[in-house]
Image (tube, rainbow, N blue to C red):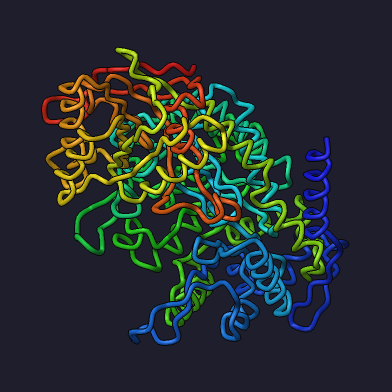
Amino acid sequence: MLKTINRILCICLALALLCGGMAFADAGVTVDLKTKSIDEIIAGMSLRDKLAQMMFFCPRQWKEDAASDAPAENIRVLNDYTRQYIADHRFGGILLYGENCGDAEQLLRLVADMQQANQEGGGLPMLMAVDQEGGNVSRLSFGTSGTGNMTIAATGKTENARAMGRVFGEEMALLGLTTDFAPVVDVNDNAANPVIGVRAFSDDAGVVAAFGCAFMAGLHETGTMVSLKHFPGHGNTDVDSHTGLPLVDRSFDELMANELVPYKAAIDAGADMVMTAHIQYPQLERQTYTSITTGEAVYIPATMSRAIMTDLLRGELGFEGVTVSDALEMKSIWDNYATDDILSMTINAGVDLLIMPAVRDKAMMEQIDDLLGRAVTLTEEGVIEAAQVDDSVRRILALKRKYGLLDKTDFTVTDAAVAAAVAGCGSAEHRQTTWNIACDALTLLKDENGAFPLDVKEGEKTLVLFTAASRAGAAEFSQKLLSEMGALPQGATLEGMTIEPDTADACMEAARAADHVLLVSRAWASDCLDPATENGFPVGVVNRVIDALHAAGKGAVVISCQLPYDAACYPGADAILLSYGSGPMKTMPPESGEGSAWVPDLPAAICAAFGAVKPRGKLPVSLPKLDEAYHLTDEILYARQVE
């Protein structure tokens, strides 16, 4: 009961910090936003301010001279130039990244300083956003990193999605962050997808819809705005839109029966925002464009397509909220389309908010200035439709008013706000919630010959072989957790090693000498499944270790700690446990994780291998067989269990 009361108090304090009454000063004119209608506010805005209101500024790093050899500094405190820049431009929102996030007090003060600088320049309160999906995509380096979507779906319980959303929302509210670019509601029905994967709940549209709506509900309970992504679906691609221009060749009817099912459900449930996908859909948008890089004809992507962003999203699906582009600097957009066309076609398509290229030096800030200036000129020339600009600003301001943001007057950071943020971000209650979800998700896909869990005796050593060095610290951390649980026999130890080309032989020798071996496989893309590739090299070593263990009369236990599709790589394993996620942990987290965000999935899986946690999860995606060349096939090896 005390924990619940404390949580409610933290939320109330955070919401109190976000709400209040405000006077908006613009060009020396004081406007009482409480008494003005949205249209009256818009009527008092210049064209430049309207277009700035449609932009997310992304200040990641600072460097005075881009040509100098000096390293860029992460923007965690505003310098004089950046503070004045924010004041002068009056953007609609700011998107923060990992570079901006140090600890709770620092981020709380940075967010408040950005809002204060914007207000001093006469700006409307800004949307303050992060990509806090959980698991692999968690921008906060402190607090509760949480589990990813596929982990949550593997529990089979939508209430876990709601709980995870609530944890993220509570911590964001304490930091002054208003907007979460989550949940991902893409249907991951292409196992070769290089960018979505475990960020998706499932490969089944109905499962994604149910869990996505529950996650959204949890965020909404904390007063946090949400943005569904990536519309109309990034799940059936084999190209990452960060690095290339994907294409999904599906008809309207096919999309309505699959990719669009979660979007429709979430829109009907009150989604605030929808983020676009930089993907070609030739059966929806047939207009082509000559790529500025290759000279080849490419289709207009969803982000720049009125047929998709207005006719489909608003017309067919009935969405009345705010649309936001994915980052416009991604190569799928920046490498193919001219700057003026990116601006004009995206806005005219019906996208309300544009995520500007991330800033890493002073010159890039000046480039953003140029983009804003071009948008003004294009609108004055009639290339960008002025009426579309007004419609977009109207929707943005309506969303801000709905959440009380336009009434904000005071961004002063109090001692009480700092104390609440420090105590609430990464609280014991939040971490326990996340740990419980990670444990509930663990899926024992295969168990033969009594190999699982390990039968560890006093004084025995367990070698944990990792296929990714970035996860190797999980061995030492799991030993500490097991000791705290009383689940590690006296004198028993865990030793971590990483399988790399120059360590493969040493790993083989260590495996032969160890009393027990855990094999931790991490696949993040389809080429990780093929031992003939650089990323897939460890697969061959793992299978050699499995053979060596069998020759010694020992069992072989594999833990898949990210994409579960690597389960098909190890047919000889006696047991395969899926955790669906893991976070970088090269060394032990400071103070056993207190004050530092860490993803619990892999430590939970290692603890389960020692019998400290009982796997109860169900498979949320179907796992295909591999052919002799280790390529994914259409034949199913393990069928989805979550329905």
Identify the residue at horizontal 42%, vertical 29% (top origin): 458
The number of numbered badges drawn on the structure is: 0
Q: Residue at x 76, y 65 (%)?
A: 41
What is the x, y in percent for residue 424? 71, 51
- Against 570, residue 401 (above or below) is below
Q: Choose top left, top right, bottom left or bottom right for residue 596.
A: bottom right
* Quarter the N terminus occupies: top right
- Horizontal side of 92 relative to 614 (left or right) equals right
Nearer to us in this view, 171 or 49: 171
Left-right relation of 464 to 112: left
Residue 76 location (% of width, % of height) = 57, 72
In this view, which residue lies farthest toward the top?
A: 449
**Residue at 18% across / 45% down in the picture?**
506
Q: Position of residue 551 (x, y in %)?
A: 15, 22
Decide: is 552 above or below 603: above
For residue 43, say whether it is visible.
Answer: yes
Q: Position of residue 609 (x, y in %)?
A: 41, 27
Where residue 95 sits, quadrant-wise, is bottom right
> Foreground residue, 494 or 279?
494
**Can you see residue 323?**
no
Say above or below: 137 vs 549. Answer: below
